[in-house]
Image: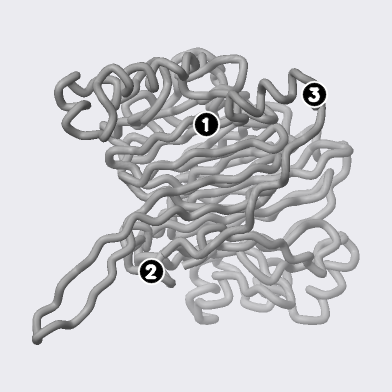
Amino acid sequence: MRGVSRGKRESKNNNKVLPHTHRFDQRTNRLENLQNYRIVEFQSKPNTLILPKHSDADYVLVVLNGRATITIVNPDRRQAYNLEYGDALRIPAGSTSYILNPDDNQKLRVVKLAIPINNPGYFYDFYPSSTKDQQSYFSGFSRNTLEATFNTRYEEIQRILLGNEDEQEYEEQRRGQEQSQQDEGVIVKVSREQIQELTKYAQSSSGKDKPSQSGPFNLRSNEPIYSNKYGNFYEITPDRNPQVQDLDISLTFTEINEGALLLPHYNSKAIFIVVVGEGNGKYELVGIRDQQRQQDEQEEEQEEVRRYSARLSEGDIFVIPAGYPISVNASSNLRLLGFGINAYENQRNFLAGSEDNVIRQLDREVKELTFPGSAEDIERLIENQQQSYFANALPQQQQQSEKEGRRGRRGPISSILSSLY
């Protein structure tokens, strides 16, 4: 399996970049627990609207660039929400929704975690509108059913709701809308007057208030759980937010400053799907590769520790399996969005640093029995790193060299990705 998924495809649609859906279980059985999760990314141009649809999947979406007004429609109410950078919102399965980019200049970039309801790993969008490339769900009903449903002659229903192919093409040209080839459906241009009406009653993020049952929440509204001059780490856990509680997912937002290192650590239970929102860097992941061989009709298994490394840039997606130690090095200011699967009671264990360091917590006698060095040497080594969670990515010797005359010179770009498994 490829450790990092990357690459964007430009759409023929003048209003957007094509969304692309990422699967995680196709190339390795080690990620079988992710078979029912998908990541969907899309962008839309300023002053555009993604027309209404509903899906047989739950969504948790996060805005990574620009602004959005998202309207969710249910049988007894309609609620609009304003979302900005870092805001997240759950769209329940079956809820009709539409997404507006009200900004005059900025593109909207959204990342969604999709959790299908009917079939593991597969979900479908249902549209009330018809275009030359997309059928309305109304078109699936028989003529008699439609006439009885609307108490109207079929010809009138077809004219108003369904149209014909020539009329659909004319309407698309008149309204400036085009059909995408994947998930996000039809996008139309909207006027300033229409934007004002669509955003008039929209609610904004709850900020530092208690998270609401349905409204948007910002990943950075509360204090970071880890922070120093090298970076910040924010986390929304299932026990802190009712919108993600029953989904058993967490959301993280990590800011790593240029030249800094997120210290090695591992997650006890959660599998993290991570999206690079901005910047460049490198990650190193430590895993176990099984080597099986046949001897005398008995199968023996060898386990080999492997390091997997990858360059990271905007739009890349990678997976951190539970229990696998990882570190992240930022060659420019790096922003990472994470979705934690199986997140309830997950514990993050750091392997270095002055706080939350599991190696530091080992008994002195156990340290001496575990490692080649003496207990004194081991504890001195641990004490050398005075930072917690984030630190300077340069070893101490290189830091000294920079002070002596190479200050301001940037280090080499990190290495290319090798296969995860």
Badge 1 marks a residue whose secondary structure is strand
Q: Is residue 259 left or right of residue 337?
A: right
Furthest-bottom residue in this view: 297
Q: In the figure, 91 relative to 404: above or below?
A: below
Q: Which residue is the site of mark 3?
A: 407
Q: Residue at x 34, y 20 (%)?
A: 356
Q: Earlier in the sequence, mark 3 or mark 2?
A: 2
Left or right of 312? Residue 2 is left
Q: Which residue is mark 2?
A: 28
Task: Label 2: state its secondary structure.
Answer: loop
Residue 94 in view: no
Q: Which residue is mark 1?
A: 262
Amino acid type, callout 1:
Leu
Residue at image position (46%, 52%) is: 319
CA gap, disc 3 and disc 1:
22 Å
Label 3: few (<14), some (14–19) or many (≥20) C-alpha neighbours in 10 Å? few
Give the left or right position of residue 2, taking residue 290 as reference: right
Name the amino acid, label 2: Thr
Is residue 26 at all visible to an observer of this figure?
A: yes
Q: Nearer the viewer, mark 1 or mark 2?
A: 1
Please tell me which of labels 3 and 1 falls first in the chain. Answer: 1
